[in-house]
Amino acid sequence: MTEVPDRIEVVVNDYTALNRGVNEVAERATLATRLLAAQVWLEKVKVLLWAALAFGIFLILLGIAIFIARGDLDLSWGGTKETIRYIKVPDPTKSQVIEKTIIVEKPVITPVNIPDEAGVSTRFTIFRSVGEVDGTNINVVTGLNYPNSNAKFPTNQYCYAITDKESDGVDERINLATKTASSSEQVLTITEQQAEGLGLSIEDANALHAHCKFMRTPEPPSAASIDADENEGPDKPKISASSGTGFAVNADGYFITNAHVVKDCDIQGVFYAGKPRDLEIIAMDDKLDLAILKGSSVKILDYLQFSPTLVTGQDIYAFGYPLLGELSKEIKVTNGIVSSLAGLKNDPTRIQITAAIQPGNSGGPVVDDRGLVIGVAVGRLVGEAVQNINFAIKKDDILAYLSQKRVNFMVASNAVSQQTPDIVDKLKQAVFPIFCLKQN
C-alpha cells in the first residue's frame, strides 16, 4: 500500500511586479500612438493654414491687379485717403498721368448745437490757449463768451496769463486784456508785483497780451444808420440790423425788452450815452415775448418802478424809439388809455391800449400818470378795418417772470400823479434803444 504523506507542500509564485511592468509598457505604447496621431493632425492643419494664406495673398494681388487694370486705386494710410488714378495715354511707355487728391484743412470754431429751452441758459465759453510762451511755463488763455450755440460771434472776450508755481503748486493768474463786441481790445497794465509773480520783467509781462487770440467781431452800427442798410450798394456787408426799445428795472444793470427784439441775434446791445454797449441775454420767454438783458458796461442813472394797480380806462403813456434812423434820436411818447385787460382772443397776459405803437416801440414801457410801469409794448393789429388797436404785456406777468428769474424790481406804493413833461424827463434816464445784429 502506498503511504499517504502527513503534509502536502504547495508553492505559490507572486507575478504582481511582472503584471505592473506589462501594464506600464502598454500605457506607454498607447500614449505614443496618441502623440503620433496628434503630430500628424497638426501637420495637416499647418498645410491647410499655409494653403489658406497663399490663397488669401493670391486674392489680394488679384484685387490690386483688377483695380490697376481699371485705372483707379485707393490707398488709406492712417485715416488719410489718397487716390492714385492711372489714365491711359497714347504711349504708356513714354508718359503717365497721376492724379492725387489734395486735402486742405482749415480750423473753424463750431459751437456745439445746444437746443433752446425756456428758462434754461445756453451760454458757453470757448478757450484758446498758447502754451509755454517764449520757452517759459506761462500759458496765455483767451476766453470767448457766447450767449447761445446759434451765435456766430462772442459777446465779450477776455485774456489772461497763468503759470504754475513749482514752490507751492498754486497757479498765478494775471488778467491781460478784454474785448467786447462793440469795442476794441482793452490792454490792462501789469504791475511790478504781478510781473514778479509771473517771474518776468515788467516789460516782458506787459508784452504778453500780444499772444491773446481775440476773435474779430463786426462793428455795431451807429444810431443814425441802424436802418440804413436797405439803401447800401451791392458791396454792403452781409449783416442785418434791427432795433427796439428796452428799459432798466434796477440799479444792477438789468433791462427788459421783447423777446422778438433780440431773438437769434449774433450781437445785441443798447445805445447808451450815444454809444453802443453790449448786453447779455439772461433769460427769454418766447410765449410771453419777454427777454431779460444785463449790461456790465452800463452805469444805470435811474430805473423804472412798477405800478401796484391796473384798471380799464386809466390814462397811460407809451415810450420808445420807433423807426430809429428815420425819425429823430429823441425818445418818443404817445398817450392813450387802457381799453381792455385782455389781449387778442382774450389773451390774459396782454392788455389792449390806444397809445399808438410803431415798429421800434417793441419792448418799451407803458406807464401810468405817475410814471409807473403797467406793461411792455409788444405789437399792434394791422388791417384795413382795424384802427388804433395796440397791445402790451400785462405788468402782473412781467413781475412774475422777473421773480422767477430772481431779478430785483420795485413796486411803488405811494407815488403821486405827475405832469407829462416830468414823466418824460424821468424816463429819458431809464429807457434806451436796443439794437440787434444778425449775420445773413
Image (cartoon, grey):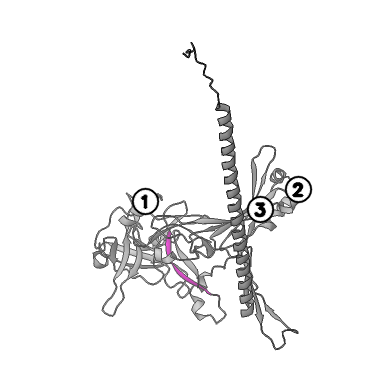
Checking the image for residue 201, the label placed there is: 2
For residue 420, above or below residue 301: below
Q: Residue furthest bottom?
A: 90
Magenta stretch, main secondary structure class:
strand
Image point 24% across, 67% down: which residue? Answer: 345
Residue behind mark 1: 404
Q: Is residue 130 left or right of residue 41?
A: right
Nearer-N-terminus badge (2/1): 2
Q: Which mark sits nearer the N-terminus, 3 or 1?
A: 3
Give the x, y percent position of residue 209.
68, 56
Q: Is residue 377 above or below residue 133?
A: below
The residue to which callout 3 is attached is 140
Type of the residue with mark 3: Val
Of labels 3 and 2, earlier in sequence is 3
Q: Secondary structure at mark 2?
A: loop
Q: Specify whether 15 is left or right of 265.
A: right
Query: Does the image show residue 81?
Result: no
Residue span colored magenta: 237-247
Q: CA distance from mark 3 to mark 1?
A: 39 Å
- Give whichever of 273, 397 is nearer the camera: 397
Q: Position of residue 286 (x, y in %)?
A: 37, 62
- At label 1, which amino acid type do we have? Gln
